[in-house]
Amino acid sequence: MVEFDTDFPRISDEHLSQFVIDVFTSYGMRQWDAEISAEILVASDLRGIDSHGVPRMAFYVDRLKQGGFNLEAELEVVKESAGAIRFNANNGFGPPMAYKAMERCLEKAREAGVCMASVGHSNHYGIAGYYATMALDHPGMAGISMTNATPLLVPTHGKVALLSTAPIAAAFPAGNEAPFVLDGATTAVAWGKVEIARRNKKAIPAGWAVDEEGLTVTDPFDARALMPLGGERDTSGQKGYGLSLMVEFLCSQLSASLWSRDVTGSRVEEIVPSDTSHAFIAIDISAFRDLDEYAASADELLGSLRATAPVAGQTRVMVPGDPEAEAYADRTERGIPVHPEVVDTLRGIGTEAGVAVPF
């Protein structure tokens, strides 16, 4: 769950989704593209990942106003084999391009057992976890998703951000147990967590971010870049650095796109194609073992983890995906808590776009 959402006004996911659709279409986005983009954006908020939900609207709208996306782009197949496919997104809006790529990846995995897709020349696609969990809508399928982005990660012992947060997401089904759903950056945190701390005037933990000299800071307003997952070298930060670099190879190097150092985003004066790249993997579990045997084995694994004794002060042990599932249950029933500053920003976006603001 989100740390600072107790007293925030709550808005229904239906109202937020329709608002996002209306804003996107007002700037010329195709209806289906707007609908799937709204679904992916609001899914982030529903899952409690507020760093990638509707607070990102200002970033998207700014690029829409300046022609930063090719709204007529089609996902183009560059190269294809039985278990691999490379796409060119042609600077299309990230979420619909990524959705179509993962959809095709899943189709091919049904035939080949496993498929990997790379997508080049794309844009920010939202939360990685959405695309991984698309596999869970297909019985017996598992999914993996990752992306590069703008440079925010300082390599171990470096002070200049060269790699991205490089999130990795994976979703594996079980039988009766809730699925395993991993969705995390290879930096200590996502940059959106720093933005949340700024909105709430809260200090950030040491080890999250660094200043312009590469030194760790606790004031979020001094933060200029993020540390790798693990932090300093003494706490194994080189592992997060290495994971980010692995994502870079799977995304930019296989898709022939720019690597994170040269990907553009919100920190540039002149809007140009960002050239973000993604990678997706779909796995047909039945290609490896009997599905009933797999489900029983996965249930035993996940059930044992959830049933293990917690340390003092904690109520239970969770599996990745459990906190997001709890947030989803709460927010679909009670609405999504949205920071007042974000509400004001959204209202301003709606007024400028000439669309109704239902909150």
Image (cartoon, rainbow, N blue to C red):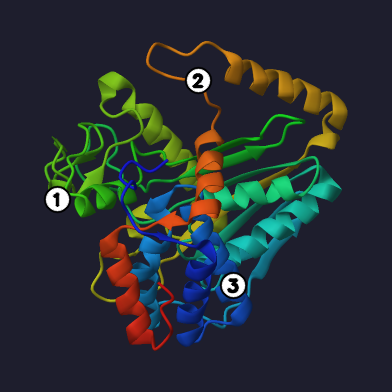
In the picture of the structure, the residue carrying the numbered disc 2 is 316
In the image, residue 125 above or below residue 242: below
Dot in front, 1 or 3: 3
In the picture of the structure, the residue carrying the numbered disc 1 is 221
Q: Position of residue 323 (x, y in %)?
A: 50, 36
Q: Residue at x 37, y 16 (%)?
A: 313
Q: Quadrant of the C terminus?
A: bottom left
Q: Amino acid at mark 1?
A: Phe
Instruction: Tell me the CA gap for discs 1 and 3.
Output: 34 Å
Q: Amino acid at mark 3?
A: Glu
In the picture of the structure, the residue carrying the numbered disc 3 is 35
Whether residue 299 sits left or right of residue 268 in the image: it is right
Whether residue 70 is visible: no
Q: Amino acid at mark 2?
A: Arg
Q: Dot 2: what SS?
A: loop
Q: Quadrant of the N terminus?
A: top left
Whether residue 289 sits left or right of residue 132 in the image: it is right
Dot in front, 1 or 2: 2
Instruction: Tell me the CA gap for discs 3 and 2.
Output: 37 Å
Q: Position of residue 312 (x, y in %)?
A: 39, 11
Q: Residue at x 72, y 54 (%)?
A: 105
Within 10 angstroms of label 3, few (less than 14), some, or many (20 or more) residues? many
- Which of marks 2 and 1 precedes in the sequence? 1
Dot in front, 3 or 2: 2
Q: Position of residue 261 (x, y in %)?
A: 33, 54
Q: Give the camera-side residue of 164 and 342.
A: 342
Whether residue 49 sits left or right of residue 233 in the image: it is right
Q: Dot 3: what SS?
A: helix
Whether residue 104 is visible: yes
Q: Position of residue 192 (x, y in %)?
A: 33, 51
